Amino acid sequence: GTIHSLGDGILVAEIQQSSDLTFRIHDWDWVDKNGQPRELHLKEALECIDFECGPVEPVSSGFSPTVDSKTSEFLIDSPYFQVERLSCSNSRTISEENQCRILMVLEGACKIATEATSYSCQTGSTLLLPASCPEVLIESETSDGCQILLTRVV
């Protein structure tokens, strides 16, 4: 495992194998409504930490969407999944046969429509699109356009 923490104003897309585990090694003095702290898991965390990983520099892609364009940028292309950042100033269609996808709105607001229904989405909205939805229309609802994180399982 990799030690990490989050703070105010951070939007995270943590793409990983589902483990349903959280080991807390520090909890920033957080207490519940009864004034009780959450349990810490020091022993378990130490057993899972990858001490060989070393420090990791933040990833910056230099992505800069252009108004009235449909820009795409691959952020991750691994043997297990792909992550792509899409810019949409008006509308764009994503067509992919036999593949489920996860769409997360990074910035702006948009309507995401399939053949069967449509969803109004804001920053942070996340949709799981089954493989039975081969075509998806994204329509920006903000003047600055929107940015979408598209994740595919390979």
Image (cartoon, helix red, strand yellow):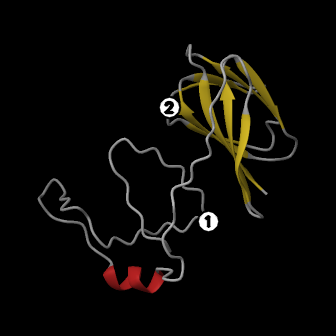
In the picture, measured across the screen, residue 52 lies left or right of residue 87, that is left
Q: Which residue is mark 1?
A: 17
Residue 132, placed above or below residue 3: above
The percent coordinates of residue 19 (x first, y second) are 54, 68
Q: Which mark is residue 131?
A: none
- Tag 1 secondary structure: loop
Residue found 40% across the figure and 84% down from its top: 46
- Label 1, label 2: how far apart the Cα atoms are: 24 Å
In the foreground, 37 or 34: 37
Q: Which residue is mark 2?
A: 123
In the foreground, 58 or 25: 58
Residue 15, placed above or below residue 8: below
In the picture, measured across the screen, residue 32 lies left or right of residue 83, that is left
Residue 120, placed above or below residue 75: above
Name the amino acid type tagged 2: Thr
Residue found 74% across the figure and 26% down from its top: 70
Name the amino acid type tagged 1: Gln
Residue found 61% across the figure and 31% down from its top: 147
- Tag 2 secondary structure: loop
In the picture, measured across the screen, residue 18 lies left or right of residue 2, that is right
Q: Residues within 10 Å of mark 2 (few under 14, many from 20)?
A: some
